[in-house]
Amino acid sequence: MQWDGNGDNADGANWKDTGPVFGSGDRGTPGRANDVVSPAPPPGPATALRPNYPNPFNPVTLLAFSLAEPGRVTLQIYDLRGRLVRTILNERLEAGSYDGTYRWDGLDAAGHAVPSGAYFCRLATEAGPVLTRKLTLLR
């Protein structure tokens, strides 16, 4: 039952059986439909390259990143002169978080130990930005 808005609401003659019933999704006012819009679901993870751990490191560091969309991903290590030292990852991955799944052991592509110093980890995706982080290797 719902009050029709005319006359005294204490008089049962002013109540009708039409419209939404009190407690049927409204916010506590009889006859007033719920106009509250449900919030959108939270967005998935953004594409990000998180700090490596440990940093500085010797002999191994863990690389962490997240992907907003599935696609081809490359994760590469460069020296200060911009030369490619090693490709850690070059494959298609699903969207999600990759924490400590990949690591760099301070070796180049030929398996030789690189000297102490600063290096850059570069994450590139098909659909997103190229992200870079500085790594410090201490021998």
Image (cartoon, helix red, strand yellow):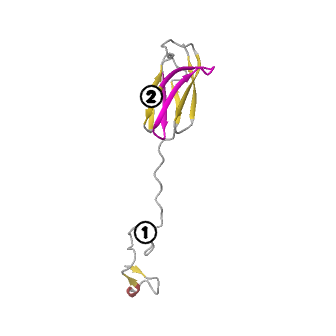
Q: Are marks 2 and 1 in contact (CB under 8 Å)?
A: no
The residue sitting at 41% across, 86% down in the picture is 14
Whether residue 102 is situated above or below residue 8 in the rendered picture: above
Question: Dot 2: few (<14), some (14–19), or many (≥20) neighbours within 10 Å?
Answer: few
Whether residue 45 is situated above or below residue 82 in the rendered picture: below
Q: Earlier in the sequence, mark 2 or mark 1?
A: 1
The stretch in magenta equals 61-88
* Residue closest to the eye, 28 or 10: 28
Whether residue 97 is situated above or below residue 13 in the rendered picture: above
From the top left corner, tell me how far across and down residue 58 is, in percent: 51, 17
Whether residue 106 is situated above or below residue 131 in the rendered picture: above
The Cα atoms of the two marked residues, 2 and 1, are separated by: 48 Å
From the top left corner, tell me how far across and down residue 11 is, in percent: 40, 86
Residue type at mark 2? Gly
- Residue 136 lies in magenta, yes or no? no
Quarter of the rendering occupied by the N terminus: bottom left
Q: Using residue 81 as the reference point, say whether residue 48 is left or right of it.
A: left
Residue 100 disc label = 2
From the top left corner, tell me how far across and down residue 37 is, in percent: 48, 61
Report helix, strand or loop for mark 1.
Answer: loop
Residue 26 disc label = 1
Quarter of the rendering occupied by the C terminus: top right
- Residue 82 lies in magenta, yes or no? yes
What secondary structure characterizes most of the magenta part?
strand
Report helix, strand or loop for mark 2.
Answer: strand
Residue type at mark 1? Asp
**Residue reaching furthest to the right:** 81
Numbered label tally: 2
